[in-house]
């Protein structure tokens, strides 16, 4: 075997044989660890995070699934044969085509198992099921027609429930975040009794729930499309299918609609929805001259039925418009913009910690200063190498490292999870005021921040220092304004603002561990839409905070963070009155890391 200067075998076939010799594998590329009117604002912020994550080179999607791969990406099969046989088949295929594994050719190559395509195509066209030989695994692309109940074609329940739970928390958090009465109703009375009364008082004899038209006929269908996408992206029998008039496609979308129906009923009547958070239904009130408890059939129907229509429309646009746009440009900003044609699918991707443009049925890689659409190994090959390192250890692990091209290799001087660059976002809430510096009482503070950090110093394997500036995308400040009119609607004032914290530092500990505690401090300013905390106050507030938390690394370049900050807001006496406010903010965040472009 001949090796190049980079340590890679010189031919595509030899490279595949080298990869495949590390360890056998079975890989599933798709296995990944409210009120909607204000969804657009959050979608923009989330899309920005998705764009940033693309810079880390995370954006190759669905490799090993489609019938073709991008230039320089030779696909390993999802183990339909024993590992050695599968690798040999790929190698022989490459030798027959003379296609270099890591070459600069812009042409596409067929997968090594293209010879099995007639059975796959016949299954879709004629409705016949795919029946592999005994003892063989089923490739993901063959799952829609599989009749053997293969393990690789089973529903990913765990990941589906995790994404659905995140979406449910997002919707409940949105209602509580933006609705004073949701918070007031939830915190008053006997919670469980009121939850039961909310479901028992549902108006089953009425269609309308007296909510706005956009809420009932736009927002809820979009909600149904998001839950459909959550199901589809975790269903091997549907995740790779494009729009088509065949049995497999319609069965997949009908199963998704069934899940959307269940989710809709839970959202309206279940213990983790509007019956329990806000207690919709257990009390009547007058809204625009109409006596209502805001219940009725409309949203129970428009969510799954309208969601199905929305999903079909997105499937059409994805097949005929988005795919074509992807071929014209792989700029991450443009890829993000394209997702506003398929917003439900893009948002569901974010819920599984993927860039908005990720697709299970084809490769979509962003082109940035950190990555290039044509470089590196495909996702399935990367996964095989990961398993080789995890299972083989020793020499096998070393061989895997030697095979990693520059596109995948971590910085030569980097150790441990994470990376020198970090892009992330966090959401926090403070329901209890502090009084170390500020003296304003009963202030609620809820920020959403985007952050970047750069590790510029590491002391051996003990601790690190990062420069960590932040952008405050939105910051809600809510404080009491009691009056003597007896009007319950004017007891508190809420104002929104945005800002930046250019001064930020983070001290991390145990940098080689997957669980890393840290301390942090930030300083900056927030500009609000109105005077805050006092009629004589200012719209401009300086901010400073101190705190800490723990980062949990799901993978080498992904982390979930929980933390606490003691935050002080003050106008520094630039106005006639400066009460100041202190917030005890608890927060949760997500982040992506990388080393390229350092």
Image: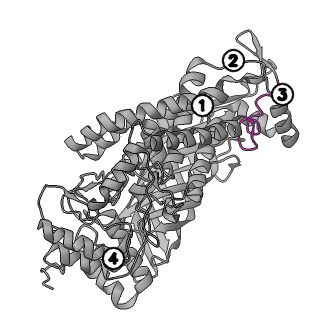
Q: CA distance from mark 4 to mark 3?
A: 60 Å
Q: Which residue bears the numbered disc 1? A: 303
Q: Give the residue at x 14% y 55%.
A: 107
Q: Are marks 2 and 3 in contact (CB under 8 Å)?
A: no
Which of disc 3 and disc 2 is earlier in sequence?
A: 3
The residue mark sitting in front, 3 or 1, is 1
Is residue 282 within the magenta segment? yes
Residue 414, numbered circle:
4
The residue mark sitting in front, 1 or 4, is 1
Which of disc 2 and disc 4 is earlier in sequence?
A: 2
Which of disc 2 and disc 1 is earlier in sequence?
A: 2
Q: Secondary structure at mark 4?
A: loop
Q: CA distance from mark 4 to mark 2?
A: 59 Å
Q: Give the residue at x 79% y 23%.
A: 203
Residue 433 at x, y percent in the picture: 69, 47
Mark 3 Cα-neighbour bin, 10 Å: few <14, some 14–19, many ≥20 = some
Residue 201, numbered circle:
3
Q: Is residue 13 above or below residue 578?
A: below
Q: Are marks 4 and 2 in contact (CB under 8 Å)?
A: no
Mark 4 Cα-neighbour bin, 10 Å: few <14, some 14–19, many ≥20 = few
Q: Secondary structure at mark 1?
A: helix
Mostly what secondary structure, the magenta segment?
loop
Q: CA distance from mark 1 to mark 4?
A: 48 Å
**Boundaries of the magenta span:** 269-283
Q: Secondary structure at mark 2?
A: loop
Mark 1 Cα-neighbour bin, 10 Å: few <14, some 14–19, many ≥20 = many
Is residue 404 within the magenta segment? no
Give the residue at the far top of this rendering.
Answer: 289
Mark 2 Cα-neighbour bin, 10 Å: few <14, some 14–19, many ≥20 = some
Q: Locate the N terminus by quadrant.
A: bottom left
Residue 139 at x, y percent in the picture: 40, 62
């Amino acid at each position: 075997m001949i090796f190049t200067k980079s340590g890679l075998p010189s031919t595509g076939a030899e490279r595949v044989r080298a990869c495949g010799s590390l360890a056998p594998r079975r890989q599933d590329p798709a296995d990944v660890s409210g009120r909607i009117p204000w969804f657009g604002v959050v979608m923009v912020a989330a899309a920005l995070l998705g764009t940033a994550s693309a810079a880390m080179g995370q954006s190759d999607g669905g490799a090993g699934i489609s019938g073709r791969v991008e230039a320089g990406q030779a696909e390993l099969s999802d183990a339909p044969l024993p590992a050695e046989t599968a690798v040999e088949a790929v190698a022989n295929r490459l030798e027959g085509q003379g296609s270099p594994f890591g070459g600069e050719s812009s042409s596409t190559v067929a997968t090594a198992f293209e010879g099995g395509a007639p059975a796959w195509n016949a299954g879709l066209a004629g409705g016949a099921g795919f029946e592999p030989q005994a003892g063989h695994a089923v490739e993901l692309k063959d799952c829609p027609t599989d009749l053997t109940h293969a393990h690789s074609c089973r529903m990913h329940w765990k990941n589906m429930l995790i994404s659905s739970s995140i979406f449910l928390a997002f919707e409940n958090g949105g209602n509580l975040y933006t609705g004073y009465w949701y918070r007031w109703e939830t915190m008053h009375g006997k919670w469980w009794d009121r939850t039961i009364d909310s479901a028992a008082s549902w108006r089953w004899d009425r269609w309308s729930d007296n909510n706005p038209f956009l809420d009932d006929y736009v927002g809820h269908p979009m909600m149904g499309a998001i839950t459909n996408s959550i199901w589809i992206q975790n269903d091997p029998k549907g995740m790779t299918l494009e729009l088509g008039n065949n049995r497999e496609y319609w069965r997949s979308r009908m199963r998704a609609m069934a899940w959307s129906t269940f989710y809709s009923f839970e959202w309206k009547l279940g213990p983790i929805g509007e019956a329990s958070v806000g207690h919709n239904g257990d009390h009547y009130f007058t809204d625009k001259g109409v006596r209502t408890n805001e219940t009725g059939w409309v949203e129970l129907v428009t969510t799954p039925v309208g969601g199905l229509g929305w999903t079909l429309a997105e499937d059409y646009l994805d097949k005929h418009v988005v795919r074509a746009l992807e071929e014209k440009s792989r700029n991450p900003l443009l890829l993000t913009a394209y997702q506003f044609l398929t917003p439900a699918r893009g948002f569901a991707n974010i819920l599984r910690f993927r860039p908005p443009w990720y697709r299970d049925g084809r490769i979509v890689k962003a082109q940035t200063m950190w990555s290039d659409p044509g470089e590196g190994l495909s996702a399935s090959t990367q996964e095989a190498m990961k398993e080789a390192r995890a299972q083989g250890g020793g020499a096998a692990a070393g061989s895997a490292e030697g095979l990693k091209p520059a596109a995948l290799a971590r910085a030569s001087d980097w150790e441990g999870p994470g990376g020198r660059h970090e892009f992330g976002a966090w959401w926090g809430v403070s329901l209890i005021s502090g009084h170390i510096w500020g003296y304003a009482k009963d202030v609620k503070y809820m920020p959403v921040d985007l952050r970047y950090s750069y590790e510029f110093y590491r002391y051996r394997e003990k601790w690190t220092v990062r420069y960590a500036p932040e952008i405050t995308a939105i910051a809600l400040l809510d404080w009491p304004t009691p009056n003597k009119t007896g009007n319950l609607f004017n007891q508190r004032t809420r104002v929104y603002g945005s800002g930046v914290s250019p001064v930020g530092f983070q001290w991390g500990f145990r940098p080689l561990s997957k669980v890393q505690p840290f301390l942090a401090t930030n300083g900056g300013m927030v500009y609000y839409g109105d005077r805050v905390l006092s009629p004589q106050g200012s719209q401009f507030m300086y901010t400073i905070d101190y705190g800490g938390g723990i980062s949990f690394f799901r993978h080498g370049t992904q982390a979930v963070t929980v933390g606490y900050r003691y935050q002080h807001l003050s106008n520094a006496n630039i106005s006639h009155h400066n009460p100041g406010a202190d917030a005890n903010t608890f927060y949760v965040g997500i982040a992506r890391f990388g080393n390229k472009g350092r």
